[in-house]
Image (cartoon, rainbow, N blue to C red):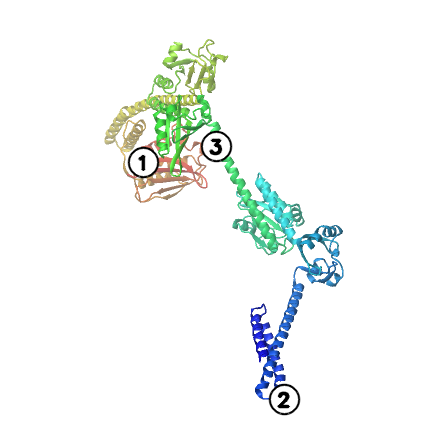
Amino acid sequence: MGIPIILALGLAAYGGWLVQSDLSPNRIRRIALWSLAGIVILGLFATWEMYTHILEGEPFLETFHELLLGMTEGAVIGGVIGYYDARRKDQYLEAERAHQALSASMDGIAILNEDGEYETVNQAHTEVYGYDDPEAFIGKTWHLCYTEEEAAHVEEDLMPQLYKEGSWRGELTGQRRDGSTFPQEITLSVRPDGGIVCVVRDITERKEQEHRLEALHSVTREFLTADTPDEIISEIVSTADDMLGYPLTAVWTYDADANRLRPQTATQPAQQFAAQAGLDSLPVLEANSTEMEIFQDDEVVLVDDYQSLEDRQVTEVPLGAVLFLPLGEYGLLNIGSPESGAIDATDQFLAEILVANARAAIDRLEREQELATRENRLRTIVENVPVILFAINQHEEITLQVGQGLDEVDIEQNQMVGATVDDMFGDSSTVTDAVDRALDGESVEATAALWGRTYEIWYQPIEADGEITSVIGVAMDVTERHRREHGIRALHDATREMMQETDRKTICRIAAETAQQSLDLPMSAIWLRADDRICLEPVAWSEQAEELFGELPVFEPGESISWQAYEEGELRIFEDVSEADERYNPETQIRSELVVPLGEYGVLNSGTTQAGQFDETDVVLSQLLAANTRAALERADREEALQRQTDQMEFFNSILRHDVLNGMTVIRGRAEFLADELEGEQLRDAETIVDWSNDITTIIQRVRTVLDTLTGSGDPQLEPVDLSPALCSEIDRVRATYPEVEFETDIPDMLPVQANELLGEVLGNVITNAVDHNDTEGLRISVTVEHDETDGPVTVRIADNGRGVPDDIKEAIFRREETGHAKSTGSGFGLFFVDSMVTEYGGDVWVEDNDPQGAEFIIELPRP
């Protein structure tokens, strides 16, 4: 019984080992089945043997061990056989899988013997080298796949390393059946028998991709060194052709003014392709085209067939695939091919990277240009504007002091660095107080007087980690500006004073005093044209001019610079008048001199005894003073002329009021007396005299009102007057006089305005003027009144379809001098009277062009 027990224990241990082995459960079950089969077979034999022994008379228990021994032996034998069967099955399946993998592998795989001859070759290996049948390799050496130079390299350099290390991986250049070469990636492993396993892969596409990427990196570097966007665009076009292999490449740039894309750069094949399609040049992409829409959307679009694109710019160009790549605000890059669907995803990806780099480069250029512009502006300011840049630390020490403004005061750059603010500017409380405030964190602006000049200074605190570490600032020299502002204020005050005077000499005296006291022109004098002879006589001068010259000369024609300036009406400036040949006094002590004409009145002279003393501010201020003086003199002349005219009008008004009106009263009284005594024809004559006397008296009273208004001696009694009956009455009067004229009216029933009893005459003059100055045949006059429910003015529009009023006299026709338009009509009132009365009413009147022809007079009248 010992042997069966030992075999059973060994079998159990064997089973445990199987469970722990790398065999799969299926393989273990297969071994178990083999063991079971052994138990059954040998158990049957042992049962037969036990049966025969029993028949021979042996006891059952003495023969039972035979059955146990047979079954355990069968189990052991079956387990061993099953194990080898499972191993053989695994080896078969592994070999089958290896064969399938070899056949299905996309990489070329070959097995060579120790002599370098091919034993096994898969289909991929065959196709890599341009063959159709793997049998073409069997029995031949690997030299079949390489050129002589490459084979020698393999023999001499690669094989020793391979057999030394057992494997090798790298790149070689293979040779196809047709003699062409290609880059390959190859892996070699040494077999135990000395043979070689070879795995080869064609990396032509990968190499091309690397070439593209290298080109992409190269052009990116070119982008970074480009100076203009045009250089970047040229690089884009050439790189797209070289890197992607699509020669139909072009760039359109955006024209913002015309809202269109204009062709900028294109490859030569693209231009030839356009010419073959019948185009003189690449087309302009208009605003309504799909190309423009793609540009505005700023999205990359790949079109497999350009002919299928709706609203495309050019319909007759036989383009296939087109890749549209917007360049931001700059323009649009088009990459095209005559074949449909020729642009793949890889090419699109590379093109997008190219465009992204180009856009980044263009943005960089724009930023750099903007920064350069800012830097140039800042440099220009610092170099050309009289400013001083400075910095002060928390200890109030000056750490920076630069700027061209220092040249004006003969101070060197950074001369004060190291000194404290108190050392340099202790006597200027404005500066020290401003620095203290800035170091306390306040931005300060101050005006300070330093080194004999005036500066506007800005202080800005600099903070780091929550603490004020320093103060930076800018000081700008505003001496001339302050001087000019002071002079302009003085001129304003002097002009106001001069405008209140009517005496010429008084006006000139104010001007001379202003030049001396306010404009820093101490030696100044004014000469005016004499009334009784042709010369310039001195009428006003400064105290220093009198001290230097005593009695000022009279300038005759052709004898002096002053007369030339007066006669020519041009400013004369002399750095040193003693060098001028036309000077009046050859021995003059004056050096710098300004001679400013006063129009027809005379000249203003200013001078100093030192050369080169007058700057631009002096010239500007002296010209302003001369202009204001001339205006004051002109006003004085107008006031004098107006006063004479007023006196004349008051004289005529007095005659009308007393002599004529009294005479008409006597005539009317005598005529009324006669009318009571006469009959028949004589009575009618007397009544006619009475009627005419009444009419003339009424006219005289109205003329008195007008004269009082124009001379300002009367106060027109303004009151609410109904516009509608006054306007309708005048229209009826003119319509009766000119029945051939057509009138169109739009007048409300009742509309009060602020006026007096002359309103009808004012409106009638405008209506009559429209008839008198046009041909009445076909004349049409439109009279409309516009108003709203508020307190705004009432507007009367009187328009005609006549010949109109030229633009150059639209304002002049209301002036008294324009007798052609201010002619007497009706009872003797012209457009001058209209303008004067409407102004007295508080309104306004002007003329515009009528549409389509003629003139339109607009009268605005205030509400009561």
Which of 860/193 is in front? 193
Q: Is residue 623 above or below residue 95?
A: above
Position of 813 with respect to 102 (left or right) is: left
Residue 504 is drawn in which quadrant?
top left
Mark 3 sits on what residue? Answer: 378
The reply, left or right, for residue 322 in relation to residue 700 is: right
Please report the residue visible at 35 percent of the width from the left and 30 percent of the height from the top.
436
Among the 4 quarters of the image, the one containing residue 773: top left
Q: Which residue is mark 1?
A: 759
Indicate which label's residue lies in the foreground, 3 or 2: 2
Residue 845 in view (yes/no): yes
Q: Secondary structure at mark 3?
A: helix
775, above or below 569, in the image = below
Q: Which residue is mark 2?
A: 52
Nearest the viewer among 737 and 850 is 850
- Between residues 337 and 573, which one lies in front from this camera angle? 337
- How many residues crowd around disc 3 within 10 Å: few (fewer than 14), some, or many (20 or more)? few
Q: Is residue 484 left or right of residue 50?
A: left
Q: Residue 256, labelled with which disc?
A: none
**Residue 282 visible, this orientation:** no
- The amino acid pointed to by label 2 is Thr
Location of the C terminus by quadrant is: top left
Between disc 2 and disc 1, the foreground one is: 2
Q: Quadrant of the N terminus?
A: bottom right
For residue 152, above or below residue 34 = above
